[in-house]
Image (tube, helix red, strand yellow):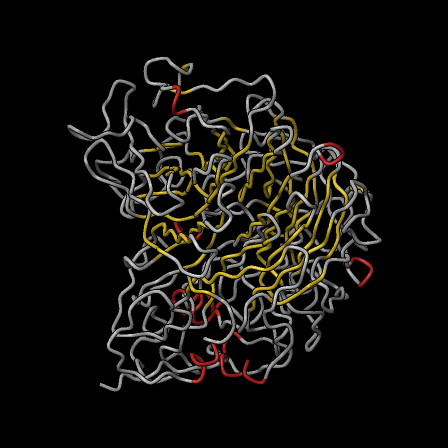
Amino acid sequence: MKRASIALAALAGLLVFWLGPAGADIGGSPKVLKLEQVATPSGAYDFKDVVLGTNITECPQAGMNTEPDPVDRRVKDDVEKISDRGDDTRANTEYSCFPQNETSIAVNPTSSRNIVSGANDYRLGWASSGFYASSDGGKHWYDGWIPFPSLPNGDNLDAGGDPALAYDRGGVAYYADINFNRTDDTNGVFVSRSTNGGFTWSRPCVVLTDAAACGGPGDPRQPGDGTVAFTPENQTTPPFGSSANFSVTFNDKEYIATGPRPEGVSPHCFKPVSKAPMNPGDPGCPAANIGPDRVYVTWSRFTNPAGTPGFITDSKIVMSYSDDRGHSWSAQQVINGSAPFCGFAFAGGTACDDNQDSVPTVSPSTGHLYVAFENFDTQDENQWLSVRSKDGGATFEGPFFVTPAFDVNLRLKADCIARGANRVHLTNSCFRVPMTGAIVADKRGGDFADDLYLVMEDNRNGTRDSTNSDVFLFKSLDGGSNWIGPTRVNNDASAAPANRDCGRTGQPACPAGVNTGNDQFWPWLDINEDGDLNIAFKDRRLDVDSTASEWPTSRARPGNYLVWTWGANCEVKLSNASECLAPTAAVIPQPTGLFNPSGPYPGSGPSSVGPADNFGVSDVPSNYDYSFRAGIFAGDYESMAVSGKRAHTLFTDARNGRSSGGPAGGTTFPSQPGRNPACEQSDVFYDSWESDHDAHGQDKPSKDDAAFLVTPCPADTH
């Protein structure tokens, strides 16, 4: 049995790299536990029990440009003055001093100045799904929360997160998220839609039978509208009672994509509970509801077949689709498949059933659906896989192997656990950093019809004591059957450590003072009809020698502390194995069994760097120790979008965060060290650039950067 609890890590041995010998060993080390390297819930749910409070009257508000000013009773410090420089625009227009993080963004194909975004938004005091809409190209924003899904008992699911945004070709916006109760296990995946550019949103409606009505008398909603998946609490009596203890299947970490139905595929509606298909024009399936595109949602289903608290057996990737603009959804379909390079499944065999962080994409020219996800059914290093459907989600091919994810040399330190962090992190910080990634289909037909691009990050060029996570690009020319790579996207100095497994069980300690580069993480990508491939990511390259920090106990090396948002772009002119790729990129053979990367591995050294231009996007750095709860959570991913000749990104930014009295911080609230938001906050900022040119953010170190290292909360002068 692989695991009988979501908290039980699978045993990890040693795999074989694609050209390495079976059973090859890393430096002769024995098998070790893959601690923290199985699929785990997303951050919005992981921190569901956090109820934030505030003891201050006003926080720094750099970037605010659409709300009236409060009766200001504080003096702006130098960091706020610096932070107001440049063209970054803050999308959350509120003064609550609560955090926002984990972003998604989409541009209206019928109106390029209409941009809609989403983020985890904590201004209610707990996680909910915030939206941010602009009709003037991101200069000004209107924001709020999408409506909470309504339940049959008259209650609603008021906690949520994991935002995912998409437009269809008709200009209808879709917002997918997870919603759940914070006090029991009721949960689901939902989609709201907006027909006015993201300024108002539909409210999902849960029903328990096909014949049930939605809400009370006069409720205009269609039963089941926006309900992709729903699982009610099953424990209502002793000994467990009603509590959040994973007693039912948990639906987590969804993402969304839209695109044309493949040739020969007809649209359908579906009954809200039985999921029986209906044809347009049938009762319950108004022909006017049928949209120009099929809307796909994929997510991770943490399965509990027995209904026993904590008995999660697997984390499958599942898919559902809608042809009627999200009013009804098809039955859930497991799509992760099985392969010889997967092992240790709960039910035995080679099922690839331990997964997380799926991302779908649809080819605009063929309507083919592609889904990428990280898989943990390995003995040691994890892996990225992809699947595809050529018939609108009816059947799937794959999984196909993309790359190992070199992430088992990350760790969770004791001082981070003491601060409330519960997932692996980077050197010098405690915010969780899952090794997420993204996939996009080329938007051109013809020679490019089967071309795909995937980005991910891992720590192959770093160690547990000194991380050096990098962003890597992979390309497929045959619809995901085979992948070419890796190509390192970030072009800063990055070298391979002598022993990337140092510090792990059975390995020597990592040598002191050996740092092979700075961290890049949370990549996303998109491509336009001209072939401008753009990638956005978080970057620490500009912090090369800082030593001050808010939490000195977390400091392990100089520099590599402050965070910027960076970008990279490259033009794909031809469909071949070299465009935008490194000279060393090569076709990665599909493994015929379990494997482990051993010996030299691709992705290290300057020869792995591709031709993409790198540039700063954000205008100032962020100190992520000033984000959610003293820097233990800044999101799990961020996104970007390319529309026409503009690239757009919404990013988590802590420039308005300050010390709340941590070990090295201010004294404004010495009784509340590390309690967000005593002055700690993160906001979501927007920026854009020409898709074939550099952005104009910070791209070299500045003496002003030091101001962000330790910044006390400004005093209330009233």
Residue 641 is situated, as x and y percent measured from the top left of the image, at 56, 50
- The front one of 547 and 339 is 547
Looking at the picture, does residue 585 appear above or below residue 557? Answer: above
Which residue, as the protein is rendered here, is positioned at the far left?
217
Residue 650 is situated, as x and y percent measured from the top left of the image, at 49, 57
Residue at (24, 39) in percent of width and height: 239
Q: Is residue 666 left or right of residue 240?
A: right
Residue 298 is situated, as x and y percent measured from the top left of the image, at 50, 36
Q: Is residue 30 left or right of residue 665?
A: right
- The front one of 703 and 286 is 286
Residue at (48, 69) in percent of width and height: 624
Looking at the picture, does residue 520 appear above or below residue 289? Answer: below
Residue 341 appears in which quarter of the rendering? Answer: top right
Q: Is residue 672 left or right of residue 441?
A: left
Q: Quadrant of the N terminus?
A: top right
Judge whether residue 532 can be spotted in this image: yes
Residue 508 is situated, as x and y percent measured from the top left of the image, at 70, 66
Judge whether residue 314 can be spotted in this image: no
Q: Quadrant of the C terminus?
A: bottom left
Q: How many marks?
A: 0
Q: Is residue 576 left or right of residue 453?
A: right
Looking at the picture, does residue 130 appear above or below residue 567? Answer: above
Residue 646 appears in which quarter of the rendering? Answer: bottom right
